[in-house]
Image (cartoon, grey):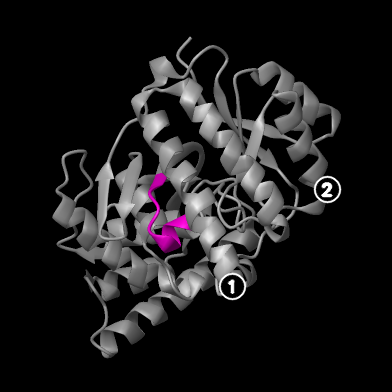
Amino acid sequence: MNRQASIFYGKVLLFGEYSILFNSKGLTIPYTHFTGQLSFINDDKYTDYEFAVQSNHQLREFLEYLRDLDSREELPCEIDFPMMEKNLEEGMYFESSIPQGYGIGSSGALVASIYDRFAINRIEASEKISGEDINKLRLIFASLESLFHGKSSGIDPLNCYLQHPLLIHSREEITITGIPRSKFENEGVIFLVDTGKIGKTGPLVNHFLEQMRFKEYENLFKTDYIPYVNQCISDILNGNMKSFFESLEVVSRFQLQHFTNMIPHNFMEAWRWGLDSGKFQLKLCGSGGGGFLLGFTTNYPAARKYFAELQHEVIPVYKSAQ
């Protein structure tokens, strides 16, 4: 097998965090700013040696997890175990610039890379892939990624593997889509803000599910939040940017009021200032609690200047056509 492995990107879930658990739509895009690739310790790489050794150890644990699934006849695809073991003995590790615990697909890219390299008779990534094969891949990836998340939807590695924006109609129906860049008007930019701390998905999801047990919160979430998430997705895909930013403001204000546990405390003021000034709007990127926040603006210079004064890094994700 060729030692040169494919490169996989991170991903950004633009819309759908928490709400896709209750049948909202979702929209996720590959993010080329961060990449991951299987490599070898003895190759001419600049990765820290200790990181590479630790990654190799993690991949050995992944191999044992896959073998355990196989022994229980629960492995959803055929894996070339001898080749994977041979490569690990040769020093294979996951060379990655995708930060862990930031909600942008570090484990998804790793899983996609393992499937791409070692799956026998794998389903090929293609822009023309059928809906049936997309769902087969999602189920495969959900099983493989469960080592890292306890329970995975499979959507993160699916996005990393297909490397196209994905529209999540439901967990069983996912299609490749596109965002009309030419209609993302003026100085329109989607950006990430680094909160400087790692988020922990499990406790936040558990807290949210506990909240949803209260009928009043559940009704509020389903009637005052999910329709606007769906509207944001519809508007951005159709290029209806005025309506998009109106719906986005509702989503952002809802999260500020009702997702306080998921928003780092030192970003509450910035979140509120962006909404009240009209300079930008923030929302969670993934489960929250740290990692990145997502920002949307039609005045990127103003947003960048604001966060620069707070000494927080801003990274563009998606820009309008200039």
In 3D space, how far apart are the residues under numbered discs 1 and 2 (Cα atoms)? 28 Å
Which quarter of the figure has residue 232?
A: top left
Q: Amino acid at mark 1?
A: Phe
**Mark nearer the N terminus (1 vs 2):** 1
Which quarter of the figure has residue 60?
A: bottom left
Q: Is residue 36 visible?
A: yes
> Does 117 sit left or right of 108 as displayed?
left
For the residues carrying marks 1 and 2, which lies nearer the camera in this image? 1
> Does 272 sit left or right of 11 as displayed?
right
Residue indicated by mark 1: 214
Q: Is residue 320 above or below residue 40?
A: above
> Does 231 sit left or right of 81 as displayed?
right
Residue indicated by mark 2: 266
Frontmost residue, 49 versus 221: 221
Helix or strand or loop: what does disc 1 sit on? loop
Q: Is residue 19 above or below residue 254?
A: below
> Does 65 sit left or right of 322 as displayed?
left
Q: Is residue 1 visible?
A: no
Magenta stretch: includes residue 261: no
Residue 256 location (% of width, % of height): 70, 47
Residue 88 location (% of width, % of height): 42, 69
**Image quarter in which the N terminus is found:** bottom left
Magenta range is 19-27
Q: Amino acid at mark 2?
A: Asn
